[in-house]
Image: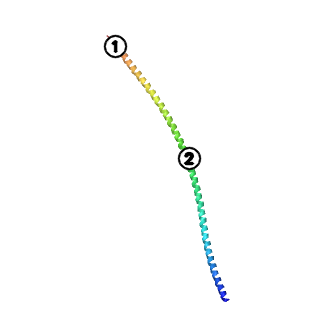
Amino acid sequence: MEKRLVRIEEMLSTLITIVGNVSSKVEHVESHQQKILQNLDKVKQEQIALRQEMTELKQEQSAFKQEMTELKQEQSAFKQESAELKQELLSFKGEMEKGYGEIIGKLAEMQADQEFTWEKSARNEREIAKLKSRIEY
């Protein structure tokens, strides 16, 4: 019976050692699990921060697209104004050329009138000179 008791003691001792080892391993696993949970919390916080940054980037991108749309509209308006100014300039140029042609025509008429007047005046002076010379003799 004593052998039996010794054997039971040995078994209990072994069981206690095993339970101690298991308990130690459970504590180690719990510690590891706690670290994993902390890391998971950090990852979740980083993920939240990334989502916020992504939202901000999307807002900035949307604002940029809006600005681009406005710039395109302004550019279109400038092109329209430029085309209108070009058309007005061509119209003005046509009017200027027409007016220039009329002025040149009037100047040509005036020059012809002046030449006619000079020619007539010179003829009249010659005739007057002839008449004077006849009268004087």
Q: Choose top left, top right, bottom left or bottom right for residue 36.
A: bottom right
Place of residue 105 in the rendered image (x, y in percent of width and height, measured from the top left): 44, 25
Quadrant including the N terminus: bottom right
- Which residue is drawn at the image coordinates 59% and 64% (left, top)? 43
Q: Given the image, on which type of amino acid does mark 2 rest?
A: Thr
In the rendered image of this protein, does residue 13 appear above or below residue 103?
Answer: below
Place of residue 61 in the rendered image (x, y in percent of width and height, measured from the top left): 56, 52
CB under 8 Å between callouts 1 and 2?
Answer: no
The residue where tag 1 is placed is 130
SS for dot 1? helix
Quadrant including the C terminus: top left
Foreground tag (1 vs 2): 2
Place of residue 70 in the rendered image (x, y in percent of width and height, measured from the top left): 56, 46
- Which residue is drawn at the image coordinates 35% and 16% (left, top)? 126
- Numbered circle sitting on residue 69: 2
Q: Distance between the residues labelled 1 and 2?
A: 90 Å
| Pick the front one: 12 or 60 | 12
Q: In this view, which residue lies farthest toward the bottom?
A: 2
- Which residue is drawn at the image coordinates 49% and 33% (left, top)? 92
Left or right placement of residue 84 versus residue 41 in this view: left
In the rendered image of this protein, does residue 34 appear above or below residue 116?
Answer: below
| Pick the front one: 77 or 39 | 39
The tag earlier along the polypeptide, 1 or 2, is 2
Q: Choose top left, top right, bottom left or bottom right for residue 127.
A: top left
- Which residue is drawn at the image coordinates 42% and 24% (left, top)? 108
SS for dot 2? helix
Count of number-bearing discs = 2
Q: In this view, which residue lies farthest toward the left?
A: 137
Left or right placement of residue 2 versus residue 69 in this view: right
Q: Given the image, on which type of amino acid does mark 1 rest?
A: Lys
Q: Quick one: label 1, few (<14), some, or many (20+) residues within 10 Å?
A: few
In the rendered image of this protein, does residue 61 appear above or below residue 130?
Answer: below
